[in-house]
Image (cartoon, rainbow, N blue to C red):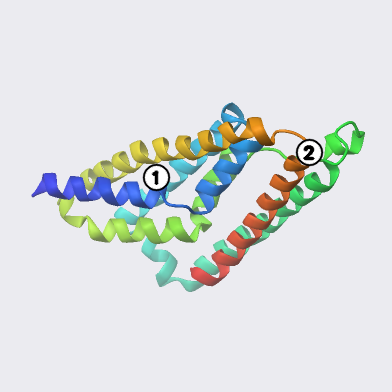
Amino acid sequence: MISEQIISLITFASIASVTPGPNNIMLMSSGMLFGLRKTLPHILGVVLGFSSMLTAAVFGIAQLLFVVPGLIWGIKLLGVCWLIWLSLQYFKAAMASTDDNNTESKKMRSRPFLFIEAFAFQWANPKGILAAISCAGAFVSVSNQASERALIIVSVFLIVGIMTCFLWTMVGNVLMQFMAKGPYVKLLNICMGILILLTAAGVVLLV
């Protein structure tokens, strides 16, 4: 019975992690814009940020977000403001990338996510919040002890999450050789800005 639960957990984690979502699309875009090495802090932020949220969900702490509506709206407001600000930086970088030799262009060049930014974003990511709460509720029978259950569930998601994050980043990294210069950089920055704005809208509408 336990082995069947573990197999179901691995399947759930794989589907939840590999399907397109804000994290995966942004990781792919980051891989195209900055390469694998500079995207590593982003990957770690995604994996560890989601793990912290999943741990909270297993212990029931995440239910506070629904018991205290003002708390979740506060988190949403902070997340949306930050996402809007970040999207503007990508739009500025897109406009400045027309002339790579321009001094102002270099000052406004976009940058990859910092670890703390990717970590914090997980707590405002609609797909991640729903996946964490659903997983915590669906796999209660994995163990009777919350600490052991959290260890099992988080370990599975850590392993699966790292692999899928690297997969999406490597897809972008491979594409980088075809889109590393010229108008493609501008297009990627614009797409990244639009994606982040759509994510901000999702934070407001879906959670």
Q: Residue furthest left?
A: 1
Question: What residue is shown at x 56% (from left), y 34% (from top)?
Answer: 41
Taking the image as drawn, is residue 170 in sight? yes
| Figure check: 179 above or below 141 | above
Whether tag 2 and tag 1 are in contact, CB under 8 A, the answer is: no
Question: What residue is shown at x 36% (from left), y 39% (from top)?
Answer: 158
| N-terminal-most mark, 2 or 1 | 1
Q: Residue furthest front?
A: 178
Q: Which residue is mark 1?
A: 51
The image shows residue 29 at horizontal and vertical percentages of 61, 43
Q: Nearer the viewer, residue 73 or 186?
A: 186
The image shows residue 88 at horizontal and vertical percentages of 75, 53
Disc 2 residue type? Answer: Arg
Q: Label 1 neighbourhood size at 10 Å, few (<14), some (14-19), many (20+)? A: many
Q: Which residue is mark 2?
A: 109
Q: Nearer the viewer, residue 132 or 199?
A: 199
User: Is 192 situated left or right of 105 in this image?
Assistant: left
How many angstroms separate mark 2 from mark 1 (CA)? 31 Å
Disc 1 residue type? Answer: Ser
Taking the image as drawn, is residue 146 in sight? no
Q: Secondary structure at mark 1?
A: helix
- How many marks do you count on the picture? 2
Q: Label 2 neighbourhood size at 10 Å, few (<14), some (14-19), many (20+)? A: some
